[in-house]
Amino acid sequence: MPAVANPAVDTPSVQATQAAVDDILAELFARLGDRQDQLLPMLHGLQDSAGYIPPDRVPAIAAHFNLSRAEVHGVITFYHYFRTEPPPRCVVQVCRAEACQSMGSDSLLEHAERTLGCGLHGRSADGAFGLEPVYCLGQCASAPALTINEAVFARVSPARFDALMAAAMPREAV
């Protein structure tokens, strides 16, 4: 079983300050140029570096690529990968593919919703947890599967989910 990163220390995406976001954008603009086919690589680079795509930076991105703000916003909202707000400290993705559903992921999802205090595509009230669907983690023979901060786990029961979450989050955050 792979170790779960402690999201309080090892959050996959760093939440950047406004000045840092401006520096990240400047570096990406310089490296990728202004061809419109570089919009997606730029958005990925920004999110990977800053943790999300700040909506107030959309006008600068649009101007750089000679696109309308609506076009850039449309790309950001079309792809479920992109975030427009800082990510939660702990992101749980429950597999919703058929093999996992046939092996109990529906009840696992219900348990996760109760435990985390949020539904799919939601966040807990304190913003610490996010719950997202994912469609196939390649663990069909070991279903049901989920990820916790991108670490994949298979054969997850509600009891195992509780143990994984206790290992992933400091005691006071669970």
Image (cartoon, helix red, strand yellow):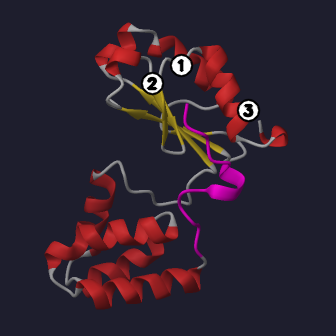
Q: Per the image, is 121 magenta?
A: no
Q: Residue 35, how many percent across, how many down?
A: 15, 82
The answer for how far apart the CA atoms under marks 3 and 1 are is: 14 Å
Name the element at disc 1: loop
Q: Residue at x 71, y 36 (%)?
A: 167
Q: Residue 56, how many percent across, how many down?
A: 47, 75
Name the element at disc 2: loop
Q: Determine whether, in the image, residue 47 is placed left or right of residue 70.
A: right
Name the element at disc 3: helix
Image disc number at residue 139:
none
Image disc number at residue 166:
3
The answer for how far apart the CA atoms under marks 3 and 2 are is: 17 Å
Q: Are marks 3 and 1 in contact (CB under 8 Å)?
A: no
Q: Determine whether, in the image, residue 77 is placed left or right of residue 151.
A: left
Quarter of the view holding residue 15: bottom right
> The magenta stretch spans which residues?
1-16
Q: Looking at the image, is 69 positioned above or below residue 79?
A: below
The answer for how far apart the CA atoms under marks 1 and 2 are is: 6 Å
Predominant secondary structure, magenta span? loop
Image disc number at residue 145:
2
N-term mark: 3 or 1: 1
Residue at mark 1: 156
Query: Which sits in the foreground, 19 or 57?
Result: 19
Q: Residue at x 71, y 53 (%)?
A: 8
